[in-house]
Image (tube, helix red, strand yellow):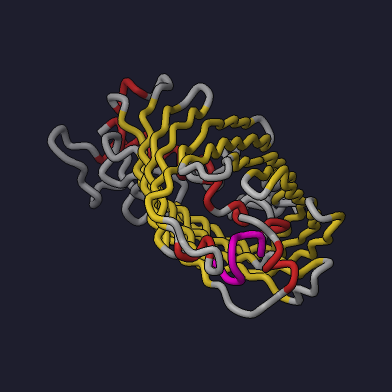
Amino acid sequence: MKTRIILIIFSLGTVFQGFSQQDKHLSMFAEAPVFLNPAAAGFAPGNLQLFSNFRMQWTTVSNEPYRTMTAGADWKMMDKGNGFMGAGINFTNDAAGVTNYQTNVIAVPVNYAILLNKSNLFSVGIQPAYYQRSVSTANASWDNQWTGIEFDPTIDNQEAVPSQNYSLSKFDVSMGVYWETFFSKYSKLTLGISGQHLTKQRINILTDDNGLYRKLNVHGQGSFGKMNSTFTLEPAFMFFVQGPNKEFTFGSNYKFLLKSGSLITNYFNDITLSLGTYYRVGDAFMVNAILDMSGLGFGASYDFNMSSLTRATNGLGGMEFFIRYRLQFGTGDLGNNRVH
């Protein structure tokens, strides 16, 4: 009962008062950086990337756990050898609690990457988006509706909030920069900085508020291998600041080449298995496994909660899955010369 009431209060407090603010929260952030930064669109191996994931967390806390789903596509075009244009379309749905508190975002990242020299690419991107938030109080239960055995929704809740659906839609925009550098044919590093919710749109459905906090993301990933080696080290980190909220996640994946592709098809005939460990500071320890087969990838991760919330979760956090497909077509000069 207490857990149910806590989730109701969280949902209603976020929507009507704006004291808390909800944003997508993913553990395998390094597998689709375009969701962090519009300047990363088109940088994946190949010409087209399709990506979708699903996350569920805090199943031990409530029968209505937090759920996040993403789906998107990004691609490379106008690849002339000295730069290319990246573009995409992304969808995110975040839902929580008995009030079905939801955030839906449809975003269109667009960028242009310039080849600075043979080893360095620099990209600038922008992302207009449609941002929608909703909540329904129809299924909410209140203290005075508890009979001692169960909640009775026919009892007057004596609250000022009517039982109905509420919704708010706004324009959103993000911008970012992204840098990719190669140290050798087998090693590279990417770094990105992005600003999200730059319009600071209103999120309080009933009254005006100070708007959604702007979010600063700093993220990076390396890939370090050697000639004739079947092992690649792939460290990554992500740090964000959003108003009073901060998060720092770091760790690494350890990739093993199970079957090598030919020299001609390269990445798109490789079969690799990657195992990873990450730490979200003050919150969770995470493990993941990723299998890539000729451009088709599957991944799963699990969070072990280490925060004060362990009293409710018993250390159990969130499960996350993704599926990804990368396709190579065309003969763009820059796309063929880059090493992944």
Q: Residue at x 52, y 72 (%)?
A: 327
Tell me the magenta residue range: 42-49
- The quarter in which the C terminus is drawn is bottom right
Q: In which quarter of the image is residue 220?
A: top right
Q: Is residue 47 one of those drawn in magenta?
A: yes
Q: In this view, does 283 lie above or below 80?
A: above
Residue 128 on the magenta segment = no
Residue 202 seen: yes
The residue depicted at 31 percent of the width and 53 percent of the height is: 139
State the residue in front, 98 or 214. Answer: 214
Work out whether residue 17 can be spotted: no
In the picture, measured across the screen, residue 242 lies left or right of residue 155, that is: right
Give coordinates of residue 27: x percent, y percent: 47, 41
Q: Residue furthest right?
A: 116
Picture residue at 74% right of the left edge, 67% below the top: 334
Total labels: the figure holds 0
Q: Quadrant of the N terminus?
A: top left
118 sits left or right of 99 in the view? right
